[in-house]
Amino acid sequence: MGAYQRMGRINMSTFFGLSYGLGFATIAATITHVTLFHGKEIYRRFRASRRDKPDVHTRLMRSYRDVPSWWFYAMLALSVAVSLVLCTVLRKEVQLPWWGLLFACAMAFVFTLPISIITATTNQTPGLNVITKYVIGLILPGKPIANVCFKAYGYMSMSQAVSFLADFKLGHYMKIPPKSMFLVQFVGTLDALLPADSPWTCPNDRVFFDASVIWGLVGPRRIFGPLGNYGALNWFFLAGAVGPVIVYALHRAFPSKAWIPMINLPVLIGATGYMPPATALNYNSWLFIGIVFNFFVFRYRKRWWKRHNYILSAALDAGVAFMGVLLYFSLSMENWSISWWGTAGEHCPLASCPTAEGINLGPDSVCPVVL
């Protein structure tokens, strides 16, 4: 507390603060959007899940033996039991009480279905990383390790469940035996538990820890509450929840306008939240392919677009992955670099100029002197 008083309140850049607000709006919009646009379908499919006739893929997959349900139940019971033991035996180290673990599991369970629907229909996955940190930071302030654990059990459990379902869906279409898919997922998860001295590193791990200090040690009340500077960002929750209601009302008022239901606010708001780390090139490419290219193709070759748009999306994702691997092995691994206009920064010479008063960098500098 004394160190916090000496350092003062947390201050964020405009973009960084806005990205948190957009994260609040995204998760609220996800719940409202799925409820309004997919609620009836979810209820209908739930009631008819045992009576619907299987499609061609399901009939072909019956040639393989399905994964026994007890495999999933056993893994769930084992994971929860081990986690409860850690929260109880190592209570001081973990800082997360047993009810906090169950609360995190409940959040992952509730949000998995709506987020899976957004992922299945748009190939974009809203995250629980912000809301989990926010909730546990309010409940258990001053406990950074508890914040990390709650985020891992709440957010990562949901994220891995969606990825697991996506892999099973791919295996369903590719006619891969379900048991093989399950075992590959299981072995891959164990293999990911790399030692501390592994050459494979992940910057997100450091971000994961740094966020726990901000959200767990300082706490949301000193950021977005009455003790912080960013209380106005809480209005993004309301804006995100109301947005899909307006879109749905317009859809009901103008049912002949087929483009209105295509306004997916969870995706639009969530994509906007990637502004801070993204350069203009990222969004220019997205605008060209996602809007300009698809507009002309959809307008003049609608039949082709309906058949091949999904394949085009997969091809673009595969191209990014392929180039990432190629650049790593051809450049990064050998510590080589290519210097050209595209890697020369933002091309804004004034971006590195100091903003403090009275600083003069010399006669050759392009930076103005702040008076």
Image: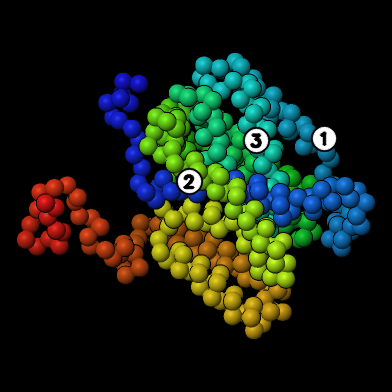
Visible residue check, residue 115: no
Quick one: SS at disc 3?
helix
Which residue is painted at 50% across and 64% down in the image?
323
- Give the mark nearest the N terminus, 2 or 1: 2
Q: Residue at x 84, y 40 (%)?
A: 68
Label 3 CA crowd tier, 10 Å (few <14, some 14–19, many 20+): some
* Residue bearing mark 3: 107
What residue is disc 2 on? 21
Q: Nearer the viewer, mark 2 or mark 1?
A: 2
Mark 2: amino acid: Gly
Q: Is residue 243 left or right of residue 203?
A: right
- Name which residue lies at 60% across and 47% down: 241
* Amino acid at circle 1: Trp
Tag 3: amino acid: Met
Along the viewing direction, whichever of 336 and 21 lies nearer the viewer: 21
Mark number, residue 70: 1
User: Counting other residues with Cα less than 10 Å from the Cα at mark 1, is it few (<14), some (14-19), or many (20 or more)?
Assistant: few
Closer to us: 198 or 352:
352
Query: Gap in Å between the C-alphas at discs 3 and 1?
Result: 23 Å
Tag of residue 198 = none
Q: Real-space Cα distance between discs 3 and 2?
A: 20 Å
